[in-house]
Amino acid sequence: MVRGARQPQQPRSRLAPRLTGTVEKPPRKRKSRTEFALKEIMSSGGAEDDIPQGERKTVTDFCYLLDKSKQLFNGLRDLPQYGQKQWQSYFGRTFDVYTKLWKFQQQHRQVLDNRYGLKRWQIGEIASKIGQLYYHYYLRTSETSYLNEAFSFYSAIRQRSYYSQVNKEDRPELVVKKLRYYARFIVVCLLLNKMDVVKDLVKELSDEIEDYTHRFNTEDQVEWNLVLQEVAAFIEADPVMVLNDDNTIVITSNRLAETGAPLLEQGMIVGQLSLADALIIGNCNNQVKFSELTVDMFRMLQALEREPMNLASQMNKPGMQESGDKPTRRENPHKYLLYKPTFSQLYTFLAASFKELPANSVLLIYLSATGIFPTGRSDSEGPYDFGGVLTNSNRDIINGDAIHKRNQSHKEMHCLHPGDLYPFTRKPLFIIVDSSNSVAYKNFTNLFGQPLVCLLSPTAYPKALQDQSQRGSLFTLFLNNPLMAFLFVSGLSSMRRGLWEKCQEYLRKINRDIAQLLTHSRSIDQAFLQFFGDEFLRLLLTRFIFCSATMRMHKIFRETRNYPESYPQLPRDETVENPHLQKHILELASILDVRNVFFENAIDDY
């Protein structure tokens, strides 16, 4: 049974007071409008005077709640997308109204059917809005448990066929509501790694689009077919399949599990910083995306989240909970997902994150973007002389690119240069750049003495390696799912589940040893150790070193530009070229029977 829309559990002081009473009385200006609607609705059911007063009040209250819910929901889009505090009270009010609306239609369904003419698709629309609220609450808070709540409402719509009668009505706008519901449901299922459900939904959506375009002479047929193509490409982005014995595909999750990050040894001296905020920016040309989420963005956001827990299983009481009843939650870093932002948008979000960053916390910036290279030689070598990564131009700039590119003495306007990030190094900053010009961010200067680390992707990959750039970057894949990336560079495209789990266990051992290499190093820059106390950053650092060591040992990665780099530089002999780590990589290759693609004695080959 579908539950009421529980207001997400936040400390009570951070939300507006709850609406009191069973149903609020509408203001006068609303009352006349609601009564007018009431007369219109009831006109077919007999004289208005014949309708019992109680039933009239039920319909009036429902109309008011429905009207109020729509106002509040529509107002959500006017809230600032950045900043973590301004929106909370508004979301709280919206959840409260939708909870009342949902419970009200359940309690008075017969009256609403008879007097209001409530249709099943209207119930589905309310449930869909609640699902959207939970999804957007996930985006605002990064609490993965709210994805489960969104899934439960979307799933109920499908199970109860709330939209089944829409196709019988000659109203294309209702069918579009149904199609949008499917698209939103697919996004939530992708984020929850429910790929079996995704495939079923895609088939149903395809049938619905075909019926829609056949019945109505629509102009958006191409757009809806593009949605199908995008999600199909997104599902197939992983380069390696894990298979059960019956050849069914195993769905693997790459969120942080309880045993995910290597544990700190007793006595390890590391910083006490924690990752609080992350900007995940995607601006790669031609990369697979779905719903303004590129494959690289999708992989990185999962690398910065814990496995979701079901909120319902942690609660004893249905409906909204008092503050003392809230479940124990494990915090994820808050994230902003920015798809092809302009420079001004990116800087606005950066400034908001920087402003709200708590004490002893880290801001992470992940850039997956096309490289922008300097157009001419410069006498100086400052933080604006090496190029950077692409940001989008505003649509209202006419021929702006042509104008500023004519003069090579000017810097690229639509580029995020390393120097643009200097103001934010006043607080602990962790940067990941996946770009063909990632090395521009080697040219950093730590002006303020705060912990600062940049992890930089290779700027090119060997030609012998099949080009997978459309399906996501190899570097980001290593940071998200290092075993899958290792299998791909080893030429493997599928793997049995038993062997996969054996290799994952060995990879956990490798991560533990990498952690020891880092913390026992005598020459490593202290910035790395400052970040090592946070589980997410620890896992990213160990995966980065595994990635770099793997590529340096691989026979086809022979150019300097094929290797990841970092700022500050890591001591190679103690980390990425450590003989103990190289031995582990060869052992992993032996388990997979691909030892022949790696040099046996990598150090001697440099």
Image (spheres, rainbow, N blue to C red):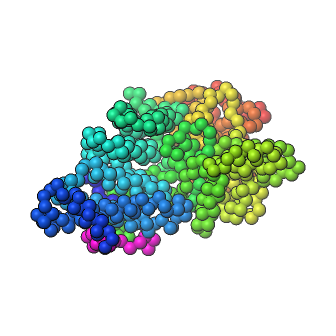
Front residue of this view, candidates 346 and 525: 346
Q: Is residue 286 visible?
A: yes
Q: Is residue 513 visible?
A: no
Front residue of this view, candidates 575 and 481: 481
Give the residue at the far right of this rendering.
Answer: 379
Stretch of the chain drawn in magenta: 13-27
User: Which residue corresponds to the image point at 76% horizontal and 47% vertical from the top-left?
Assistant: 404
Position of residue 573 in the picture relative to residue 584 (left or right): right
User: Which residue corresponds to the image point at 33% horizontal and 57% vertical from the top-left?
Assistant: 312
Give the residue at the far left of this rendering.
Answer: 50
Numbered disc total? 0
Q: Position of residue 149 (x, y in %)?
A: 37, 54
Front residue of this view, candidates 528 and 95: 95
Q: Position of residue 390 (x, y in %)?
A: 67, 46
User: Which residue corresponds to the image point at 53% horizontal and 49% vertical from the top-left?
Assistant: 301
Residue 25: in magenta span: yes
Magenta stretch, overall SS: loop
Q: Position of residue 306 (x, y in %)?
A: 48, 52
Location of residue 42 by image quarter: bottom left
User: Which residue corresponds to the image point at 44% horizontal and 74% vertical from the top-left?
Assistant: 13
**In this view, 324 is above or below 341:** below
Q: Position of residue 187 (x, y in %)?
A: 44, 45
Residue 106: in magenta span: no
Position of residue 539 in the picture relative to residue 415 (left or right): left
Q: Quadrant of the C terminus?
A: top right
